[in-house]
Image (cartoon, rainbow, N blue to C red):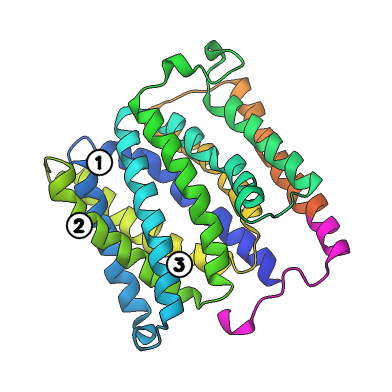
Amino acid sequence: MSRSLKAHLLLVLITLIWGSNFVVIKNALADISPFFFNAVRMSLAAVVLAAVFYRELGRFTAASLRSGLLVGVFLFVGNELQTVGLKYTTPSKSAFLTGVSVVLVPVLLALFWKRGLNRWTAAGVLLAFVGLHLLTVPASAGSGLNLRSMNQGDLFTLGAALVFAFHIILIEHATRTQGWQQITLVQVTVTALLMIVTVPVAEKTYVVWSPQVIWGIGITGFLSLALAFAIQAWAQQFTPATHTALIFTLEPVFAWLTSFIFLGERLGSRAGFGAACILAGLLISEEKAGAESMAVSPDHAAVPSQHG
């Protein structure tokens, strides 16, 4: 199995983890304030990663620290906005609005990094975005995004989508020049520290140590933060940022499946067609755009072997 294929499959795995955690987080936030919840689970992730990558502690360079710090700031802001937003909106709507980053990634790459967009990738992005809309926005909302129905939670989540789009791009750049283990450890540690500092000034902290809270901290700290960010940092060495964003559009599909199983949230044929559009967008981008890119630039995916 090639590194590229392995990276794509692992990105799908962490998307499954993130999608299934919307319900876990939503339930936990009934008994704990969002900033405190984030600070505790991110601190747990930082401790876990430090234990796993302890050999990297003496190998940091100024460049890796700078890159990890920058990525960590974006990760911090995105997570805070998304978690606060989720407190006031539904899991499936949060997943859709977060998925707007699939459109923002190629736009930001074109605006700030002057990177052109392959026609097949553009088609895949557009198809995936249509699928996101069909999957998570009810038919009663009409053909648009029904902006009049948006609440403060939706606006926070849209802000998170913009920040996460930058995060995806910055991770790609950082891990292709610096060790992915160092980037992972620094970004999560920086995020945890920022979250700890933010708690006393951003909210009136409250917590009931219910099973939902303990489970939410444990499962998200180990899986959706420590494991997932380590996998993302490794995988984005071999996966373009736009492809990563497309894979992440599967998140609301997994979020809906989890909501259906545990909350009884039902979606009909419209949602099924939306999910099919997302999958089609992924396939078009991976197969057509990948083949075209290889034909134009055979060594496009080359990366330093020391990062693997």
Residue density around tag 2, few if under 14, some if 14–19, many if 20 or more, within 10 Å: some
**In contact (CB < 8 Å): disc 2 and disc 3:** no
Residue 23 belongs to the span the image colors magenta: no
Q: Is residue 27 left or right of residue 272?
A: left
The tag earlier along the polypeptide, 1 or 3, is 1
Residue at numbered disc 2: 196
Amino acid type at circle 1 is: Ala
Q: Position of residue 128 (x, y in %)?
A: 66, 37
User: Which segment is the magenta one?
Assistant: 290-308
Q: Which mark is residue 230?
A: 3
The secondary element bearing badge 2 is classed as helix
Rendered residue at 31%/75% (across/down): 50
Pick whichever, 114 or 277, lies toward us.
114
Rendered residue at 60%/52% (across/down): 112
Q: Quadrant of the N terminus?
A: bottom right
Amino acid type at circle 2 is: Ile
Question: In the current view of this chain or complex, which residue is farthest to the right?
Answer: 295
Q: CA distance from mark 2 to mark 3?
A: 21 Å
Q: Of the residues tagged 1 and 2, which is closer to the observer?
A: 2
The secondary element bearing badge 3 is classed as helix
Q: Position of residue 69 (x, y in %)?
A: 38, 67
Residue at numbered disc 1: 28
Amino acid type at circle 3 is: Ala
Q: CA distance from mark 1 to mark 2?
A: 18 Å
